[in-house]
Image: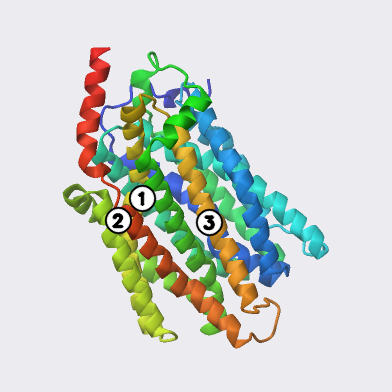
């Protein structure tokens, strides 16, 4: 068997730093596609391919229906998967090359086609790449945390490593994409060549995750675990109140980040007059976040995931406020980006780990453990956030009268860009804080886990 030395047999009891880093590499790869979609895809479509922002927004919104179906199907598949590599890692191995090809397809719209033909291509390429392939590889990756350990603190540490590498992936995309596109000729074909190069990097980093991580939780229980009927799994899911809160939290986070991220290239190009500032803003934001995340573990252990995430959200709002005041002052804008980076360290370190913790709550509440289904529904929430953000940006830009190929934009377009870049994310983050006030799982988790262990011993 190929890769026979990389099965879950004889996995060490403790998770090493090397394994944590290997786990984080998966989100570096995921964020090559995700950050490219969130930051540059709309810009590529409007300013290079030449299609209307509103039309793209409608396509993204319609695609959410397919996203919901693909997430739930993949969650069910994961729960029923059995292989020497476990339930999650095997799907990373199977889909890593198609995933990289899908990323290239997103940025390979034939420029000579009519607008209708381009929109048809955009619909199918987006759904193949994001709805099918991103779901197929990223959902098992998200589920992997729950299968590596049941220790709540270790999950937090894994989440921190994950988000450090995810942030590095986002920073890489935001700083390198436009320079590489310019290197290849700064036309539609240049975008395709750029993402062929980036696709190779996706394969390399996801293979590190597959080769050097191990699943432990299912290895302990495979002999005893019964297949859960799909309908029963769904019934258990809707009874899990903390999963619902954590998923709503994810949706709000990704809508806010998606709206801001998609608007950034428009803000730098149209208002500041220099699209290359996307890279410098990203360095200020992501580099600050990376540095701060090395110190987050202590705060999570001391104050809990919810409180750290809420504190990060408050700081995040303050960063947006500074940028709103700064308007076109580069020094103030960079300071606002750094403050947002500080806040986002707390948000990113906890948002996925909170979803994973709801697996044990759901098992305790209903007697049914469904790692794949819980993470699939959360993944759907993440992509719903991304889709809503693109729809929102497309709608706001269209209402503002933005035309990508125009020599000059009306004043209303500038206001629309500012709203997407600063004001809408502030509103969404406030709502997110309100939702989290009802989340109390951090205080309940240890007693829930102890009760689950006593139940297993008594059986």
User: How far, Cα to Cα, is label 3 from label 1?
Assistant: 15 Å
On the image, the x and y values in percent for residue 18 come to: 32, 40
Front position in the image: 44 or 447: 447
Residue at screen point 37% across, 21% down: 219
Q: Is residue 391 above or below residue 350?
A: below
Pointers 3 and 1 in contact (C-beta within 8 Å): no
* Sooner in the amino-acid sequence: mark 3 or mark 1: 1
Residue neighbourhood size for the residue with mark 2, other residues' Cα within 10 Å, grouped as few (<14), some (14–19), many (≥20): many
Q: Check residue 386 in the rendering and tell me which mark sits there, or answer none.
A: 3
Residue at screen point 25% across, 19% down: 455
Q: Is residue 418 above or below residue 130?
A: below
Residue 183 seen in the figure? no
Q: Check residue 351 in the rendering and tell me which mark sits there, or answer none.
A: 1
Pointers 1 and 2 in contact (C-beta within 8 Å): yes
Quadrant placement of the C terminus: top left
Residue 13 placement, left or right of 279: left
Pointers 3 and 2 in contact (C-beta within 8 Å): no
Q: Check residue 309 in the rendering and tell me which mark sits there, or answer none.
A: 2
* Sooner in the amino-acid sequence: mark 3 or mark 2: 2
Residue 51 placement, left or right of 245: right
Q: Is residue 389 above or below residue 384?
A: below
Residue 311 placement, left or right of 371: left
């Amino acid at each position: 068997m190929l890769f026979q030395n990389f099965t879950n047999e004889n996995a060490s009891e403790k998770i090493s730093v090397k394994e944590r880093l290997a786990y984080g590499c998966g989100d570096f790869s995921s964020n090559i596609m995700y950050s490219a979609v969130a930051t540059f895809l709309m810009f590529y479509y409007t300013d290079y391919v030449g299609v209307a922002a509103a039309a793209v927004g409608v396509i993204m919104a319609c695609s959410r229906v397919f996203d919901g179906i693909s997430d739930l199907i993949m969650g069910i598949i994961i729960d029923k998967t059995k292989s020497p590599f476990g339930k999650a890692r095997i799907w990373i191995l199977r889909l890593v090359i198609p995933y990289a090809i899908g990323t290239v397809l997103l940025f390979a719209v034939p420029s000579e086609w009519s607008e209708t033909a381009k929109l048809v291509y955009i619909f199918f390429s987006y759904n193949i790449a994001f709805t099918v392939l991103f779901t197929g590889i990223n959902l098992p990756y998200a589920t992997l945390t729950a299968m590596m350990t049941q220790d709540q603190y270790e999950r937090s540490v894994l989440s921190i490593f994950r988000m450090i590498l995810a942030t590095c992936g986002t920073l890489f995309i935001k700083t390198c994409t436009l320079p590489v596109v310019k290197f290849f000729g700064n036309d539609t074909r240049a975008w395709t060549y750029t993402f062929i190069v980036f696709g190779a990097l996706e394969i390399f980093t996801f293979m590190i995750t597959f080769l050097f991580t191990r699943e432990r939780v299912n290895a302990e229980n495979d002999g005893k675990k019964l297949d859960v009927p799909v309908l029963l799994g769904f019934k258990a899911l809707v009874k899990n109140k903390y999963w619902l809160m954590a998923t709503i939290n994810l949706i709000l986070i990704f809508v806010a980040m998606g709206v801001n991220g998609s608007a950034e290239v428009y803000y730098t190009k149209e208002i500041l007059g220099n699209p290359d500032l996307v890279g410098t803003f990203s360095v200020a934001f992501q580099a600050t976040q990376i540095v701060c995340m090395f110190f987050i573990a202590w705060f999570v252990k001391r104050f809990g995931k919810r409180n750290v995430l809420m504190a990060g959200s408050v700081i995040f709002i303050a960063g947006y406020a500074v940028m709103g005041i700064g308007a076109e002052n580069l020094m103030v804008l960079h300071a606002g980006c750094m403050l947002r980076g500080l806040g986002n360290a707390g948000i990113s370190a906890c948002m996925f780990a909170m979803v994973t913790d709801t697996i044990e709550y759901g098992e305790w509440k209903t007697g049914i453990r469904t790692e794949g289904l819980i993470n699939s529904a959360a993944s759907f929430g993440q992509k719903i956030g991304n889709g809503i953000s693109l729809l929102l940006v497309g709608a706001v830009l269209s209402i503002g009268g933005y035309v990508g190929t125009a020599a000059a934009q009306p004043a209303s377009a500038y206001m629309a860009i500012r709203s997407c870049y600063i004001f809408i994310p502030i509103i969404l983050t406030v709502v997110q804080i309100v939702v989290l006030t009802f989340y109390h799982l951090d205080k309940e988790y240890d007693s829930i886990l102890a009760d689950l262990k006593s139940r297993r011993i008594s059986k």
